[in-house]
Image (cartoon, rainbow, N blue to C red):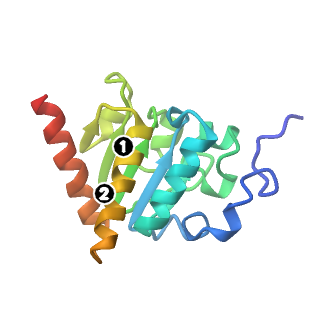
Amino acid sequence: MRSNGSSSAETSSVEPEKRCLTGSLTSAGLVLAAGRGLGSRAGFLALVELAELLGAQVAGTRGALLERWISHQREIGLSGVRTAPEVYVGLGVSGANFHTIGMEHAGYIIAVNPDPAARIHELAHCSIFADANLCVRELTAHVQELGQKGVKLDPAAVKVYFQELAGRQQRL
């Protein structure tokens, strides 16, 4: 039988030491979900660093599990966890039914996927049609800049950030 990559020994060695990979997904205010659209382990690790800065929890799709970026306990969906955070940000998530069943009750859904036909955009309150890695890098830089000024973004501020980004995108 083929391994599904769900054992913690097979996932990243950074997992046990990162708060964003050990907290509760069911009580999180902000969840950053990784999809295969992140493209690489390096993209996923950049997402982890952003989550640490934001105090968010990291989860993912079945694709992220199969890539061994997350453990089975971090998978959102039919065969994983169901979560309803204040704000859910899907980064490189396509929106397969098996995943969306686990996050459809989030208070505010943000989708970052360059494909306008991706199903995640149908569920999203706010859609960003851009590369997920670019959004991760830009938001990380923004959060670090604010952090130097002593400002910390909460889930509501993350929501506003993406709403403003979507507004700029529509004007282009």
* Mark 1: few/some/many CA within 10 Å (<14, 14-19, 20+): some
Earlier in the chain: of badge 1 and badge 2, it is 1
The residue indicated by pointer 2 is 142
Q: Residue at x 41, y 47 (%)?
A: 136
Camera-nearest label, 1 or 2: 2
Please state the horizontal and vertical placement of residue 138, each as a whole percent of the image: 34, 47
Residue reaching furthest bottom? 150
Q: Residue at x 45, y 58 (%)?
A: 50
Q: Which amino acid does label 1 sit on?
A: Cys
* Mark 2: few/some/many CA within 10 Å (<14, 14-19, 20+): few
The C terminus - image quarter: top left
Please state the horizontal and vertical placement of residue 19, each as a whole percent of the image: 57, 71
Q: Which mark is residue 88?
A: none
Q: How far apart are marks 1 and 2 (CA)?
A: 10 Å
Q: Give the quarter of the image for residue 161.
A: bottom left
**83 versus 128 height, above or below:** below
Q: Which amino acid does label 2 sit on?
A: His
Please state the horizontal and vertical placement of residue 140, each as a whole percent of the image: 39, 55
The residue indicated by pointer 1 is 135
The N terminus - image quarter: top right
Q: Residue at x 75, y 49 (%)?
A: 6
Q: Residue at x 50, y 51 (%)?
A: 47
Residue reaching furthest right? 1
Q: In this orientation, does residue 149 appear?
A: yes
The mark total stands at: 2
Choose between 29 and 12: the one closer to the eye: 12
Q: Taking 93 as reference, is 88 left or right?
A: left
Please state the horizontal and vertical placement of residue 3, each as a whole percent of the image: 83, 40
